[in-house]
Amino acid sequence: MIHKTFLLLLLALCLGVAPGASLRAQDPPQSPAQKQELARGKFRDLTARMQKLMVALQKTEPEDSKLLGVGLQYAQEKKLQQRLDQAGVLLQGERWDEALVAMGTLKADLATLLDLLQARDDDLRKLLEQIKRLSGFRDRVDQLAKEQQNEKEDSARTEALQRQLAELAQKREQAQALLAQQQQVRAATNQLGVQAAAEATKPLADKEAELQKQAERLQGELEALERKQAEVAPTPAPAEGQPAPSSPPQPSASAGKAAKSMAQAQQQLGEQKPEPALPAQDEAIAKLQQTVRDLDQMADAAKRELAKLPFDQQQQRQEATQSATDKLAQDMEQPAEGEQPSDEAKPGQKRVQQAVPKQRAAAGQLKEQKPAKQKQQDAKDDLDAAKQELDEALAQLRQQLQDEVLRALEDRFGAMLKRQKELSARTVALDGARQNVLTADGQLPASMVEQLQGLAKGEDELAAEAGDALKLLGEDGTTAVFPPLVEQLRDDLAAVGKRLAASQSGPDVQQAQRDVEDLLDLLINALRKTIERKECGH
């Protein structure tokens, strides 16, 4: 931080410019013009030292050097040295009223310069930058986790469709085998004629009973397969104005009907009636053929869904997510602007780094035309853990920010109250003197109008300070009770400034200034109570 010598020198300037004030207790009595000349000299000395120190600190303390540069730029933009010279001329000419206005604005600008060099809001700025940086990382991690989830779901769906196709093929083989056996039993039955001995029909009846059990078992397995089909390859909804699509195939229904026909055939064979059993056997054959066709339709639908998930596109998306994750890991390794390099990992950094090789392995599996659901899930778990670490770090920083905002606002409002009391006192003094200085035509002299304009400017500056306080409250986002009061403060200050700019200084204006002081007191007390409650853990 900037050396105390410069801050003390500037503080002396801020406190010692007004006529009648002494810069040091041991100084001999001096005239206002002599004190002003001393202030001018001190300011020249201050700016010269700041210039030299700024250059000297560029390599070793870049933040301090940058802060000094900001202070010098502010002094140049505000023309502080020239205005100190002009105030000296006014004092030498004993133009007291004009000098008072000039030195009042100078004092305010010097106080602002002191705030700049003290970097009063520097901790807040750094906190906000840190929160912004971690929030950016958190949002990127969140987006990557969503992308990884989508890619994992595609991989899982691919895997489910492949499994469904394998099971459909297996069930088709079972249905085909059952169909072939039924056709064999039917051919044997046909050879027996109208009547047959028990020893001829019993083996066929037993076989029919066995086939019936197989068909019933197949029916149950197909029902489960149909439910799975509805999940992995659902029937698409019809487009607007288009007829509803036909119902999805139900091989379980035709397998169930085949089982019933087999039961009828088995009963006829058990009664030694081969010929009456033939129609039931034909029906069983027809239903099993329908089962095979339905299974083929289901397989075609699953293949169409699988074609929507080509492995090369899945691989490309996974590689893109991997590249983005790797880039994030590299960005998290880099120190923030003005931050010293450190071996300490950022929140979530290690988890992000751990996700990259898992994503690379997933892309490799996809390249080999293999789903990579597990590797993708592992990578997503790492990204979710990184997000959680960042969320926890951000919660701590936002709590810290709230504490810093409350303290900064207390300091800001305290300084504003002090400034407002000065403006209020000068308003009362000007209003008491204005009746004695009216011109012949009843107008205020230009010097007094200028002083009123200076007071108006002071009120406007305080209104701008209240606006800055609102921005702080907006960054904090948690102290919702204060913004309405600060908005009122800003508006009241702006209203007082307008009335002073219109050369009003009477009792109504003075009461409005006292109302502003009361509102600042209210804000300061409320802030202090809030800080105390937080420190006590409430």
Image (cartoon, rainbow, N blue to C red):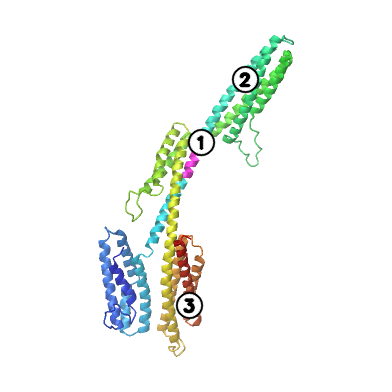
Q: Secondary structure at mark 3?
A: helix
Precedes in sequence: disc 3 or disc 2: 2
User: Mark 2 is on which residue type?
Assistant: Leu
User: Mark 3 is on which residue type?
Assistant: Arg
Q: Against 157, is 493 above or below? A: below
148 within the magenta span: yes
User: Mark 1 is on which residue type?
Assistant: Ala
Q: Note whether residue 282 is visible.
A: yes
For mark 3, what is the residue?
514
* 360 to the left or right of 153: left
Q: Nearer the viewer, residue 62 or 245?
A: 62
Q: Nearer the viewer, residue 413 or 325?
A: 413
Q: How far apart are labels 3 and 1 at the CA level?
A: 70 Å
428 within the magenta span: no
Query: In x, y percent, where is residue 323?
Result: 41, 42
Whether the residues at callouts 2 and 1 have beta carbons within 8 Å, the answer is no
For mark 1, what is the residue?
156
Q: Main secondary structure of the magenta part?
A: helix
Residue positioned most to the front: 536
Q: How far apart are labels 3 and 2 at the CA level?
A: 100 Å
What residue is drawn where x is 63% and y is 22%?
Answer: 214
